[in-house]
Image (spheres, grey):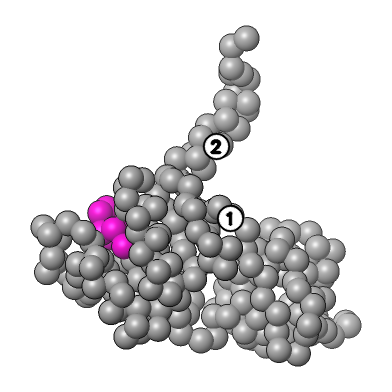
């Protein structure tokens, strides 16, 4: 069954798992630290980092305690050092090759997203089953037939695949990804995927997120659903 949880990683020095809720917040801390570093901040307190990340300082300190002791009492955290330690823990100090399947409007937007490269992800292939898409170039990458998936996965040792296809195609795409060795899938298709237990799936459903916002907006204006 599709799972929305993040799988916690353990560092080689530690045998204990990091709670999934903490793992989900580590990228937020990494983004906040990156912003602080770009602003020229060398050290920060837990309160400053928590404020930049949008969490309370007690939760942040507890989360970081799973990684080790990187703060200095009375001084705070070395921004660049803590940034590196979090990046190492979540696995983005290495280069992760990624394939995107489905080069419609969403797939093209994902291919053009500059944040992948800066966060350790390299899009190595864009694939689409539509023959009309062949030979298109998106973000400097030629769109290739979906049937090339297996060869691309072998050539680049791809472990992460992105599905940006219509819902009806999503399960077939996931099955092919799993069969050729992809073990992590980011699914943008509005369809719940069935995958083996060893395959991690993260689902991004933009319509659901908008509906949640609509619900909250409706409550703000006092326009609740009729009885």
Label 2: which secondary element: helix
Based on the displayed image, in which of its 4 quarters is residue 31 positioned? bottom right
Alpha-carbon span between mark 2 and mark 1 = 22 Å
Q: Residue at x 61, y 77 (%)?
A: 90
Q: Position of residue 211 (x, y in %)?
A: 51, 35
Q: Nearer the viewer, residue 110 or 180?
A: 180
Q: Residue at x 36, y 64 (%)?
A: 176
The stretch of residues the image draws in magenta is: 101-109
Label 2 or label 1, whichever lies nearer to me, is: 1
Q: Is residue 117 magenta?
A: no
Q: Position of residue 35 (x, y in %)?
A: 57, 73
Q: Residue at x 46, y 64 (%)?
A: 185
With respect to residue 90, does 108 lie above or below? Answer: above
Q: Residue at x 57, y 30 (%)?
A: 215
Regarding residue 200, the answer to whether it shows in the image is no
Q: Nearer the viewer, residue 18 or 79?
A: 18
Extreme residue toward the top, this view: 227
- Left or right of 114 in this view: 81: right
- Left or right of 46 in this view: 1: left
Question: Which residue is identified by label 1?
Answer: 3
Question: Which residue is identified by label 2?
Answer: 213
Q: Is residue 102 magenta?
A: yes
Label 1: which secondary element: loop
Looking at the figure, which quarter contains the C terminus?
top right
Q: Nearer the viewer, residue 64 or 173?
A: 173
- Left or right of 141 in this view: 19: right
Based on the displayed image, in which of its 4 quarters is residue 164 positioned? bottom left
Q: Position of residue 29 (x, y in %)?
A: 66, 70
Sequence-wise first label, 2 or 1: 1
With respect to residue 205, does 61 lie above or below? Answer: below
Q: Nearer the viewer, residue 126 or 172?
A: 172
């Amino acid at each position: 069954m599709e799972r929305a949880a993040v799988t916690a990683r353990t560092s080689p020095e530690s045998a204990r798992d990091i709670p999934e809720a903490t793992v989900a917040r580590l990228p937020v801390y990494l983004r906040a630290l990156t912003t602080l570093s770009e602003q020229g901040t060398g050290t920060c307190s837990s309160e400053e980092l928590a404020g930049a990340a949008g969490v309370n300082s007690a939760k942040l300190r507890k989360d970081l305690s799973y990684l080790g002791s990187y703060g200095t009492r009375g001084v705070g955290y070395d921004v660049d050092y803590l940034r590196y330690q979090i990046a190492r823990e979540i696995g983005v100090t290495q280069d992760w090759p990624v394939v995107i399947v489905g080069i419609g409007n969403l797939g093209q937007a994902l291919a053009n997203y500059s944040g992948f490269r800066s966060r350790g992800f390299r899009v190595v292939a864009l694939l689409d089953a539509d023959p009309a898409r062949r030979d298109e170039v998106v973000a400097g990458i030629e769109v290739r037939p979906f049937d090339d998936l297996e060869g691309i996965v072998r050539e680049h040792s791809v472990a992460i695949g992105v599905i940006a296809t219509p819902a009806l195609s999503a399960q077939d795409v996931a099955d092919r990804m799993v069969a050729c060795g992809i073990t992590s899938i980011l699914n943008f298709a509005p369809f719940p995927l069935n995958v083996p237990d060893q395959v991690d799936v993260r689902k991004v459903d933009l319509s659901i997120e908008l509906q949640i916002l609509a619900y909250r907006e409706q409550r703000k204006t006092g326009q609740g659903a009729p009885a």
